[in-house]
């Protein structure tokens, strides 16, 4: 059963790994421990109470996740909310960087499947990492509403994962990798074709900046402070002049360095206000503000409300 848990996180925001999720079909005689630590597939009704709670808490997860879900629920991530009804199926891809939660309505339940995997599950000979696939990229489509035919196809693929995971076949993880790729590539066929990227020196610098910006988040405890807070800090780390960095980012993204940094910091601020019980002063410190009043002013300028407003009505 998949139940909503709407709570604030603990003082120390938990880091979840695949080991936190139950694998009831995993045979005790599985000798492929290095692989089983990096991949698991399950039905939602087989999840433990603790692993269900993990989907509703703001937390760092060290794995990528694919979910096939039906039920009266809403999927929340960033500033997006996707409502799902009882008679439809959705396919959802989540990465390690963007916090999300599921809200189940009217005391109902959700049915479906999930599989989780880490970078280490992918064979090195693929020369690909999860971030290379559009469905796991923050800029790509990661939420799909499915037709009945599409839902049946993905359901059969998840069932094949479960059957193989429970088997004692010596090379089963090679097959599981193929089923994983089958799921990803059929989802990619549903998404609009992305524009071809030309990897100029400007694009490489822009991507390096985005990667450096994202690796600071999410924050795990209130004594942790982000390393790069202003354009000069990023420029120094990337070994370029701050004016050149700003010019490249403006050309590549249409936004200045300061705008991109502010947007990401405010995104983290909103997530911490919703999903943690850190005080506003603790959040302010972690995000690099000298004073809580400076954070409050920046938050109101960005969102139009005070930070305290978002916590009204939270339980």
Image (spheres, rainbow, N blue to C red):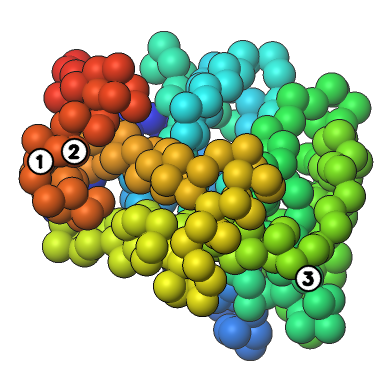
Q: Residues within 10 Å of mark 1 (few under 14, many from 20)?
A: some
Q: Quadrant of residue 308?
A: top left
Residue matched to label 2:
295
Name the secondary structure under disc 3.
loop
Say which label, 1 or 3, has the lower sequence index. 3
The one of 124 and 297 positioned closer to us in this rendering = 297
Q: Residues within 10 Å of mark 3 (few under 14, many from 20)?
A: few
Q: Does residue 215 appear in the picture of this structure? A: no
Name the residue located 41 percent from the left edge and 12 percent from the top edge: 106
- In the image, residue 173 above or below residue 6: below
Residue 98 at x, y percent in the picture: 49, 47
Name the residue located 63 percent from the left edge and 77 percent from the top edge: 120
Residue matched to label 1:
292
Name the residue located 35 percent from the left edge and 56 percent from the top edge: 230
Real-space CA distance between mark 1 and mark 3, rounded to the nearest whole angstrom: 42 Å
Residue 127 at x, y percent in the picture: 81, 77
Real-space CA distance between mark 1 and mark 2, rounded to the nearest whole angstrom: 5 Å
In this image, 112 relative to 198: left or right? Answer: left
Quarter containing the C terminus: top left
Real-space CA distance between mark 2 and mark 3, rounded to the nearest whole angstrom: 39 Å
Query: Could you say which disc has been placed on residue 103 in the image?
Result: none
Residue 227 at x, y percent in the picture: 31, 66
Tag 1–tag 2 contact (CB < 8 Å): yes
Query: Could you say which disc has been placed on residue 128 in the image?
Result: 3
Q: Residues within 10 Å of mark 2 (few under 14, many from 20)?
A: many
The one of 170 and 300 positioned closer to us in this rendering = 300
Name the secondary structure under disc 2.
helix
Count of numbered labels shown in the rendering: 3
In this image, 209 relative to 48: left or right? Answer: right
């Amino acid at each position: 059963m998949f139940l909503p848990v709407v709570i604030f996180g603990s003082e120390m925001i938990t880091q979840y790994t695949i080991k936190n999720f139950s694998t009831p079909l995993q045979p005790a005689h599985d000798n492929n421990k290095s692989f089983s630590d990096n991949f698991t597939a399950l039905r939602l009704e087989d999840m433990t109470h603790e692993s269900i709670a993990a989907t509703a808490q703001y937390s760092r997860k060290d794995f990528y996740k694919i979910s096939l879900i039906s039920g009266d629920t809403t999927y929340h991530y960033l500033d997006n909310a996707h409502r799902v009804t009882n008679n439809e199926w959705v396919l959802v891809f989540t990465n390690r960087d963007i916090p999300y939660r599921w809200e189940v309505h009217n005391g109902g339940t959700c049915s479906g499947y999930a599989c989780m995997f880490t970078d280490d599950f992918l064979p090195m000979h693929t020369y690909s990492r999860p971030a290379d696939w559009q469905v796991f990229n923050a800029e790509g489509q990661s939420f799909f509403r499915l037709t009945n035919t599409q839902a049946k196809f993905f359901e059969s693929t998840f069932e094949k994962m479960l059957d193989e995971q429970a088997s004692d076949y010596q090379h089963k993880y090679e097959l599981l990798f193929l089923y994983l790729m089958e799921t990803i590539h059929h989802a990619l066929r549903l998404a609009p074709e992305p524009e071809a990227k030309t990897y100029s020196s400007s694009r490489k610098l822009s991507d390096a900046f985005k990667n450096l910006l994202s690796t600071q988040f999410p924050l795990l405890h209130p004594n942790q402070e982000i390393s790069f807070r202003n354009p000069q800090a990023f420029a120094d780390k990337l070994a370029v002049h701050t004016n050149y960095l700003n010019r490249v980012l403006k050309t590549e993204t249409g936004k200045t360095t300061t705008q991109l940094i502010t947007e990401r910091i405010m995104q983290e601020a909103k997530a911490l206000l919703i999903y943690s019980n850190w005080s506003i002063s603790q959040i302010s410190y972690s995000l690099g503000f000298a004073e809580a009043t400076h954070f409050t002013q920046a938050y109101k300028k960005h969102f139009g409300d005070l930070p305290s407003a978002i916590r009204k009505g939270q339980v």
